[in-house]
Each structure stands twice: as structure tokens, then as C-alpha cells.
């Protein structure tokens, strides 16, 4: 009955994808029930085709999570570089967080910022840099 089904692969994927607040067992029951149209929530009672479909979905979830983590890391790196150009000591997390906690900057600690908030932070930092490097207006 377990031909063409690698349960270790299933559990490995389950251990590396975000489960949306569910326990691995709850997530397994939910996804198996979804792919078997409610027939079962037992992984062993899935057909090989159902099992393949489940694995394909889990791999897609993993790819999406990996890509979003990569994008967040790039956005954080960009923000840190801009903070450094502004003059914030980027070797000191308390300094970074103190700067970001300002409601006019981000209103939250650096590590708590989402991807979109990181993009917004980078935009604000570029505006600050532009104002810092803008030439002084000529007197009338």
C-alpha cells in the first residue's frame, strides 16, 4: 500500500515550511483531508497520486517561503546599508532599533519589520540621504 510514497520526504517538507500556527499533526490532517476530498486524514490511506499531489503542494509552499525569506533578507541588507550611509552604527542593534523605533522612521524594531515595511523604510532612508546630500539653496 505504501508503494511510490516516501513518508520521510513528507515529514521533512513539513518540518521546513511555515505551518500557519498549526502543529505538524494538525497541518498533516488538514492537507491530507483536503487532497482526499475529506475521505481520510491519514497519510497511509492516500493513493499514490494523492500523495504525489500533496508532495507537489508542499514543495511549492517551501519554494514560496524560501523566496520570500530571500527577498526579506535582501531588503534588510539594503536597509542596513542605507542606515550605515546615514550614519547609524550598524554594528549596534540597540542603535539600529532606537533609530527605527521613531514613528517617523518605522515605528518598530528593525527585526520586526515585514518585507513591505522594509521597502518603506528603505524609501524613507533614501529620502533622508537625499536631503543630507542636497546642496544648500543659493541666497537670493
Image: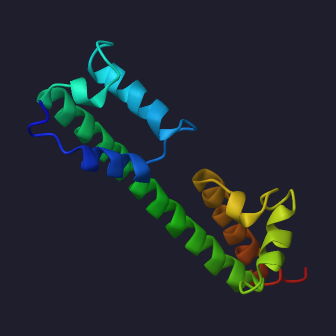
Point out residue 114 in the picture as x, y percentages from the top left corner: 63, 53
Number of dots carrying numbers: 0
Residue sitting farthest toward the right: 140
- Please say if 48 is above or below 55: above
Residue at figure coordinates x 46%, y 54% from the top left: 68
Point out residue 55 in the picture as x, y percentages from the top left corner: 25, 40
5 vs 29, left or right, is: left
Residue at figure coordinates x 83%, y 78% from the top left: 95
87 vs 44, left or right, is: right
The quarter holding residue 75 reads: bottom right
Q: Nearer the viewer, residue 134 or 93?
A: 93
- The colour scheme used to paint the residues is rainbow
Q: Nearer the viewer, residue 122 or 114?
A: 114
Report the quarter where the C terminus lies: bottom right
Point out residue 46 in the picture as x, y percentages from the top left corner: 21, 25
Point out residue 62 in the picture as x, y percentages from the top left corner: 36, 50
78 vs 62, left or right, is: right
Residue sitting farthest toward the left: 3
- Please say if 85 is above or below 15: below
Residue at figure coordinates x 71%, y 69% from the top left: 125
- Please say if 17 is above or below 106: above
Residue sitting farthest toward the front: 1
The quarter holding residue 1 reads: top left
Residue at figure coordinates x 29%, y 44% from the top left: 10
41 vs 75, left or right, is: left
Amino acid at each position: 500500500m505504501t508503494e511510490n510514497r516516501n513518508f520521510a520526504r513528507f515529514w521533512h517538507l513539513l518540518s521546513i515550511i511555515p505551518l500557519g500556527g498549526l502543529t505538524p499533526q494538525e497541518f498533516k490532517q488538514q492537507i491530507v483531508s483536503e487532497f482526499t476530498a475529506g475521505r481520510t486524514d491519514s497519510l497511509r490511506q492516500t493513493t499514490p497520486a494523492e500523495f504525489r499531489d500533496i508532495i507537489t503542494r508542499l514543495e511549492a509552499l517551501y519554494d514560496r517561503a524560501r523566496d520570500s525569506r530571500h527577498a526579506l533578507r535582501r531588503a534588510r541588507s539594503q536597509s542596513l546599508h542605507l542606515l550605515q550611509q546615514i550614519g547609524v552604527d550598524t554594528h549596534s542593534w540597540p542603535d539600529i532599533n532606537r533609530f527605527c523605533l521613531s514613528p517617523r522612521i518605522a515605528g518598530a524594531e528593525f527585526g520586526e519589520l515585514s518585507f513591505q515595511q522594509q521597502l518603506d523604510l528603505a524609501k524613507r532612508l533614501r529620502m533622508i540621504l537625499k536631503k543630507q546630500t542636497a546642496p544648500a539653496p543659493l541666497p537670493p
